[in-house]
Amino acid sequence: MSAKGESYAEILEARGISRGDFLKYCSLLSVYLGLSASMVPRVVKAMETKSRIPVIWLHGLECTCCSESFIRSSHPIAADIVLNMISLDYNDTLSAAAGHQLEAVRKQIMKDYKGKYILAVEGNAPVKDNGVYCMVNGESFLSVLKETAADAMAVIAWGSCASFGCVQNAKPNPTGATPVHKIIRNKPVVNVPGCPPIAEVMTGVIAHYITFGSLPELDRLKRPRTFYGTRIHDKCERRSYFDAGMFVERFDDEGARNGWCLYKMGCKGPTTYNACSSIKWNEGTSFPIGSGHPCFGCAAPGFWDNGPFYTRLADIGFVGTDSTADKIGAVAVGGAAAGMAAHAIGTAVKKARDSKPEPTEVEEG
Amino acid sequence: MTTMYEEQYVWRLPVRVYHWINAAAITVLFLTGLYIASPLMSSPPGEATWYHGMAWIRLIHFATAFIFIANFVFRLYWALFGRDNYARFAGFTPWKPAWWGQPFKDQLASYLFIAKEEPNYCGHNPVAALTHFLFVFCGSFFMIFTGLAMYGENNPGGFIDTLFGWVVLLFGSSFAMHTVHHLVAWVFPVYLVLHLYAVVRHDVVDKSSVTSSIITGYKHRVEQCPELFAD
Ligand code: HEM
Ligand code: HEM
Ligand code: SF4
């Protein structure tokens, strides 16, 4: 915790990063944040002068893939800066300290930086049975979360678990897993969904906070617009194949070899908001669709319940079966037709009976 | 009760024009919609820039959607303000218990073969009005709202997204909304089966020329015309 109070520039200098590299990093960051070139000096200034923000990083019901992604931030110096940008004072998977010692650190930060620290939450909290399904240090994660959020300046919900629930709250959600924004209602919460989110997106959200002192502009689902403003489909490199109607039909067909659109393989790109198709993964190397695999919508709410992953239409639980919208619809039309046919026969029978004594239809009605 | 033996002008021209635009639009929307969900044809190998198959189908769906919406809005206007006794909403008051009274029961009883009488209406009979309300009115409303919300996604933060984007939240995710838009689309073919059957049957049973009425505007041999909707 010794570095707290130092600015980012000072830390980088101490680490032997040149001024040129520092400026390059700031420009890159501005691009990620969707800022115009004229804003770069502002980013540089913020990085030079503002002191680091203490962060408490909690882990609830999760798999730690967000942390894994975060520490793999791709830009050469970003890899270094990431962990230095924020003073990550408490992170149960990354800290050297453990056990009571670590808990003491958390309490200390909450006291020293009351109302000034950021709470980053990875994973969500099961709320059923008083939260017994996720215990940290003998306490339920639910209460740890509430306690730590109480004095936080803002809350960042890392990943789909914390943002929307992910696999933990897929039907039937036995533990009552609940996303962070439904538990913490009186603090600004930003959702950074994805399983995991892209490292640059994670850094970008924090950088925005440092530069402007506020959370980035959010959309209706509390996601930063800069990164989640458009669908993967909108910037997908295979989009021209979609518009052309050239689709992969099987994973080993001609279309697959030629990089055609994966829509018919169940691609959820058209309904998923994330930056995969623009920022990409692993130093901009590729992303699922770039590697020939359909997007399965890991950044979309409820994606586990919209399966199967490899078909275009979702299974809809309908009177105990797994159907698609088309099957249900076809059965309904068939039912209506059968009903009408039966009714027609009924009409004919009735008419025949009615017309026996007196065959005049005019009186009817 | 009024008794009539002559032909009667029931559907005025705007209603007839509306009807056929509506029928055509629904047919196109349903077919292109299913195609969007599962594009059957795949373009032959080549460069993507040579073809526009999917883009065209989507464009047709969206363009037809706006015709459908305009037509629907016109019908609402006509129902509320049009000087038209038969195509108004004025009599449709299902929130009043009286609406569910004798005329409704009689019509239902006749459809279910419980009653021998076949009531005959100049405009819509109450059972038909209810079916129209559920399938056509609610169904169209639903398709329009979910459709516009999806359409807005093409331009996030734009006009349509600002107005209708909140609809997505009702369904949790964009994908879930696609699924319900798709599911409710099937309401229209179900309605079509009921509708065409009812039309043909009325023609056969009470010879009131309903079938041609939506083209010519005239119904025939309407013997009795209970003034159900008079307040
Ligand atoms: C009778 C009315 C309509 C029917 C039967 C219909 C049918 C459909 C169907 C079956 C789909 C495919 C859904 C899926 O599985 O993803 C669809 C997609 C869509 N519809 Fe409609 N629709 C109707 C009206 C509208 C309206 C009024 C709009 C408004 C603009 C609209 C806009 C859309 C959009 C934006 C899509 C998504 C296209 C895409 O993802 O590429 N629809 N429609
Ligand atoms: C031979 C074919 C048809 C005949 C004789 C016929 C007849 C009629 C009549 C008499 C009405 C009541 C008019 C009104 O209230 O506006 C009506 C309404 C309606 N018809 Fe048809 N119809 C036919 C085909 C179709 C088709 C193919 C469709 C759709 C695909 C359709 C959709 C509708 C709808 C949606 C309404 C409700 C209109 C409203 O809002 O009032 N009809 N039809
Ligand atoms: S691969 Fe997926 S995201 Fe890319 S164009 Fe096709 S459907 Fe859209």
Image (cartoon, rainbow, N blue to C red):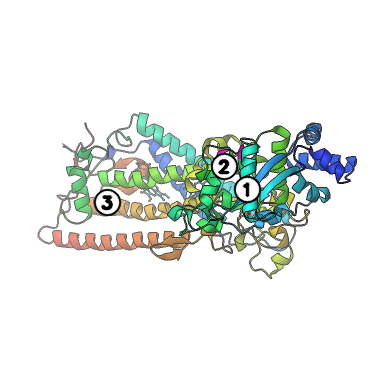
Task: Tell me the chief SS of the magenta region.
Answer: loop
Residue projecting furthest to the left: A357
Specify the label residue B202 is tagged with: 3
CA distance separating discs 2 and 1: 16 Å
Q: Amino acid at mark 2?
A: Ala
Residue A223: x and y in percent read 61, 43
The residue under label 2 is A149
B1, A105: nearer the viewer: A105
Say whether residue A153 is magenta: yes
Say whether residue B151 is magenta: no
The mark lying in front, picked from 1 and 3, is 1
The residue under label 1 is A104
B145, A44: nearer the viewer: A44
Indicate left or right for A283 with B6 as reference: right
Chain containing mark 3:
B
Residue at x 77%, y 42% (from the top left corner): A3
- Secondary structure, mark 1, is helix
Is A309 situated above or below B212?
A: below
CA distance separating discs 1 and 3: 82 Å
Q: Amino acid at mark 3?
A: His
Asked if ligand 3 lies within 8 A of label 2, the reply is no
